[in-house]
Amino acid sequence: MFFHRNNDDDPRPSGGARPLPLLPLRDIIVFPHMVVPLFVGRERSINALEEAMSHDKEILLAAQRKAKTNDPAPEDIFPVGTIGKIIQLLRLPDGTVKVLVEGAERARIRRFLPNEDFFLCEVEEVVEPSIVGVEIDALLRSVKNTFEAYVKLNKRIPPEMLVTIQTIGDPSRLADTLVVHLSSIKLDDRQSVLETLNPTKRLERLLELMNAEIEILQVEKKIRSRVKKQMEKSQKEYYLNEQMQAIQKELGEKDEFKSELEEIEERLAKKSLPREALSQVKKELKKLKMMQPMSAEAAVIRNYIDWVLCLPWSETSEPTQDLLEAQRILDEDHYGLKKPKERILEYLAVQTLVEKNQGPVLCLVGPPGVGKTSLAKSIARATGREFVRLSLGGVRDEAEIRGHRRTYIGALPGRLIQSLKRCGTNNPVFLLDEVDKMSSDFRGDPAAALLEVLDPEQNASFSDHYLDLDYDLSDVMFITTANTLNGIPIPLQDRLEIIELSSYTDFEKLNIAMRYLIPRQLEAAGLTPSEASRAADAASAALLDDDSPRATDAPIAQTTTAAMTTPEQPIEFTEAAVRAIIHHYTRESGVRSLERQIGGICRKIARKVVEQRSLVQQGEANADKHGPASGLEAGMPRTIEREDVPVYLGVPKFLPEKLHDRDEVGLTNGLAYTSYGGTLLECEVAIVPGKGKLVITGLLEKGMQESAQAAMSYIRSRQRVLGLDEDFYHKIDCHVHFPEFVPKDGPSAGVTMATSIASALLKIPVRRNVAMTGEITLRGRVMPIGGLKEKLLAAHRAGIDTVLVPAENRKDLRDVPTRVLSELRIVLVEHTDQVLREALSVSDPDALFGDSREAPLEYRDGKLYTPTRAASEDEDVPEPTVDAPGARQ
Ligand code: ADP
C-alpha cells in the first residue's frame, strides 16, 4: 500500500526548508557519503520509504534517542540527521523491506508535520562553513596519521581504507568518512559528531575519540598478548607432555609409571607395616594413582611412600646376650678402661634380665678422643646390633630431630628417622654424640624432643613431623656422649646413667698406640698385609693381656719388644719413638691426635715405599729385591726410632715441661687442669715499692683476681707470725703474674699465689721440686680442687718430687695410677701454713712458723705416712692404689 503526499496541502516551507518523510533509525547514524543497507520492519517506516520512492527518493535519516523505543514520538528522535538518497529498495517475503541508502547532506528537523502514516517533517539543510588554511592541513594530517595507527591496532578495518583516506582533502568529508569506521564509538558520541557542523571542530572531536580508542586498543592488545603467552605456555607444556608420553610409549616406557605403581604395591605387600602406617601408605598410593606422574605433588607423595617403605618397622637384628663374649669384645677393642667396661657389662646384664631397654640411658662423659664413640661401637658389636651415630653438636632446631611437616617444600624426616633408615634395623645401638653441645633458640628446644626419644615410657610412639606416624623406638639401645656434664640440660641428665672416661696417662697412651693405633694405621696405609696385622694383634694381645689399668705397671720394655718382633709386622715403632710423639707432638687427653700423627708417619713411609718401588722397577736401584710380599722394598726403614720422628713430623710442637734450675724467691709451681690434661702452671710474684696495690696479670680465668686478693689478705692476717712489719702493706705494690699461656679450668691457684707472695715478702726461695694445687679461704684453709689425677700426672711428668694436695681431695687419689702415686710424695694439706712450711726453702720451719700446727698426712711410695709414725701398713690407703706396690722403676 502506497501513501502519496498530498500536493495540495504540501506544507513545504519557504526559505530552504522542505518536507521530507523521516525514517527513524535504531542504533545507527547515517553520515553524508555513507552507503548503508537498512532493514526496515516498522509500518510507519515502510510508509515513509514508500513516500520517498514515489517522489525524489529522498528521505531524512535520523536516529532515535533510545534504540529500544518501538513507537517513537517526535521528541524521541534526534533533531539532526542526514538526508539520504534511496539507491535500491527490496521487499522481502516476510513483509520487511531492505533498503540501500546513501547519505547526502546534514539536515535539521525544523518541525514535525502532521501525518498519521509516517513521520513527515520540515527539514532544513545545514550549510557547513568551508575552511582552508595551514591549521586545517595540519589537523588533517594528524587525523590521518592517528587513523593509520588506529587501523594498525584494529584489524577489522581493511588496510585499503588508508589509501582512500589519503585521497580525501575535504575536512568535513574526511571526518564523516572516518567516523563510520570507528565502530566502537557510542551512539551519543556519533550523534554529537553529526551535530558538530564546524568541520575543524568535528575533526578535533574525532581525533579525541580516536586517541581514546587507540589507548583502549593498546591495553587490549597487551592483555591479549599476555593471555596468549600464558595459553601458549600451558599449551606447549601440554603438547610436550603428550609428546613425551608418546615417545615413552614408543620406547616401551609409557608404562613406567604403571610399573612404578605396581612396584610400590609389591613392596607394600612384602613389607610388614604397623596398621596405621599401612593404611596411610594405601591412602597416599590411591592419591598418587590419580595424579599426573610428572607433577610436583606426585613427587612429594612418591617420596613419602618411599620413606615409609624404606624404614625398618619390623626388621631387627638378633641381639646376642652372651655377657662373656661381650666382655671379650670390649677388651679386644679397647685397652684399659676397666671401670667403664664394668659399668657397661652391668648395664648389659640388666638389659638382658629385663628383656627390654629400660631404665636410664648410658652417657659416656669425657674429653675428646678417649674412646667414647669407639666404646659405643664395641657395645654394638658385643650385643650383635647395628651401629648408628648421630652428632647433636650444634643442633638448635627441634625440627632437626623431629623433621618438618610435609606441607613444607623439600620437607624431610628428622635426623633420627633418617639414621634409622640408613641402618636398616629397628634395634640398633644408637649413639647420640655430644648431647652437651645442643643449644636451643626460637626454633624450639631440641633437648625437649630428645627427652621424648630417650624416655622408655614415651618412645614407643615417637612421632616424626614428616612421617606423621608413630614409630616405636623402644627397641633401640640409645647411648649418649658428652665432653662435660655441665653442658647437658638438667632434665636430660636425670635420664642418663653417667659413665666418666678420664684422660689417659702417658703410659696408657703408649699402650694404646702400640697395641691398637699403630697396627691400625699401618694397615690403613697399606704397609702391612691384613692377615699379618691380625696375627700381630693377636700376638700382642696375648702377650700384653691385662684387664686392669693397674697392670699397666707391667714393664713396658717387654710389651714393646713383644709387639714389635712379630715377624709379619714389617714396620716397627720403638717405645721411645711413641713416647716422643706423645710428648712433643700431641697435647691432649685422648689419643686422637696421637693416632693422626702415627697415621702421618705411616703415610710418609707409604710414599717412600712406592717411590722406592718405582726406582727399583726402572732399574735405577740395584738393591736386593725382596719383592712386594713383605710390604716393604729393600733399603726402607723397618724400625721407627726416636730420632726418626722429627724427620717425619717436623720440628716438635711442644717442649717438655721443665723445672727451673734453682729455688727462686717468688716463683712457685702450681698445677692446672686443661682440656688436654694437667700441666704445670708457674706463678711469679714481684714486690716493688708502692702504695699497697695488688696487680695480677697473665691469661686469667674468672675468679683468679678474687683468689689473689684472698691470698694477699691471708698473708696480711699472718703478718705477725711471718715476722712482717705491721704496715708493710702500705709501702709496697704486689705483682702476681702467670707467665705461661695456659687456659685453665676454674681457679685453683689460691695456695700457689699465697706461697709466691709469702716467698717474695719474706725473700725466702720456694723449693723448685714442690708443686701444689688448692684454693684458699681468708682464714687460710685449703679448699679441694678438681682434676687431681691429671694434675698429679703433669707433676710426675715434669719431674716434681712433692705435690701439695688439699686434704679433702684424698679420696681422688684412688683414681691415680699406682705407678705415678708411688713415684711422688703427696702431702695432704689442710691449711696454708702447712703449704708454706713445705714449700718455702727454710732449714728450720718451726723457727719461722712455730710448731703449733699439726703436721699433715702424706703418701710416700704409694703408702700413707703420719707425721709421728713411719710407714704404717694398716692405715687407710686408698684401696686400688696398692694393687701393684713396688712397681716403681
Ligand atoms: P671420642 O668419641 O671419645 O672422642 P673416639 O672413640 O673417637 O673418641 O676415639 C678416638 C680414637 O682413639 C679411636 O680410633 C679409638 O679407637 C681410639 N681409642 C681411644 N681409646 C682407646 C682405648 N682405650 N683402646 C684402644 N683404642 C682407643
Image: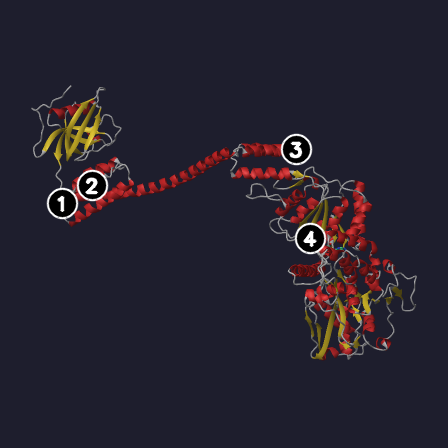
Q: Are marks 1 and 2 in contact (CB under 8 Å)?
A: no
Numbered tag placed on residue 434 in the rendering: 4
Structural crowding at the residue carrying mark 3, measured as other residues with C-alpha within 10 Å and reported as few (<14), some (14–19) or many (≥20): few
Residue 601: x and y, percent? Answer: 70, 61
- The reply to whether the residue tagged 2 has its Cβ within 8 angstroms of ligand 1 is no
Q: Are marks 4 and 2 in contact (CB under 8 Å)?
A: no
Residue behind mark 1:
131
Residue at x-position 31% and y-position 41%: 217
Q: Quadrant of ligand 1?
A: bottom right
Q: Nearer the viewer, mark 1 or mark 3?
A: 3
Name which of mark 1 and mark 4 comes first in the sequence: 1
Residue behind mark 2:
163
Residue flagged by tag 3: what amino acid is it?
Lys
Name which of mark 1 and mark 3 comes first in the sequence: 1
Residue 845: x and y, percent? Answer: 85, 76
CA distance for labels 3 and 4: 38 Å
Residue 719: x and y, percent? Answer: 79, 76
Q: Nearer the viewer, mark 3 or mark 2?
A: 3
CA distance for labels 1 and 2: 23 Å
Residue flagged by tag 1: what amino acid is it?
Ile
The answer to whether residue 236 is left or right of residue 539 is left
Structural crowding at the residue carrying mark 1, measured as other residues with C-alpha within 10 Å and reported as few (<14), some (14–19) or many (≥20): some
Residue behind mark 3:
270
Q: Nearer the viewer, mark 1 or mark 2?
A: 2
Residue flagged by tag 4: what amino acid is it?
Glu
Structural crowding at the residue carrying mark 2, measured as other residues with C-alpha within 10 Å and reported as few (<14), some (14–19) or many (≥20): few
Name which of mark 3 and mark 2 comes first in the sequence: 2
Q: Nearer the viewer, mark 3 or mark 4?
A: 3
Q: Nearer the viewer, mark 4 or mark 2?
A: 2
CA distance for labels 1 and 3: 97 Å
Numbered tag placed on residue 734 in the rendering: none
Q: Looking at the figure, which quarter contains the N terminus?
A: top left
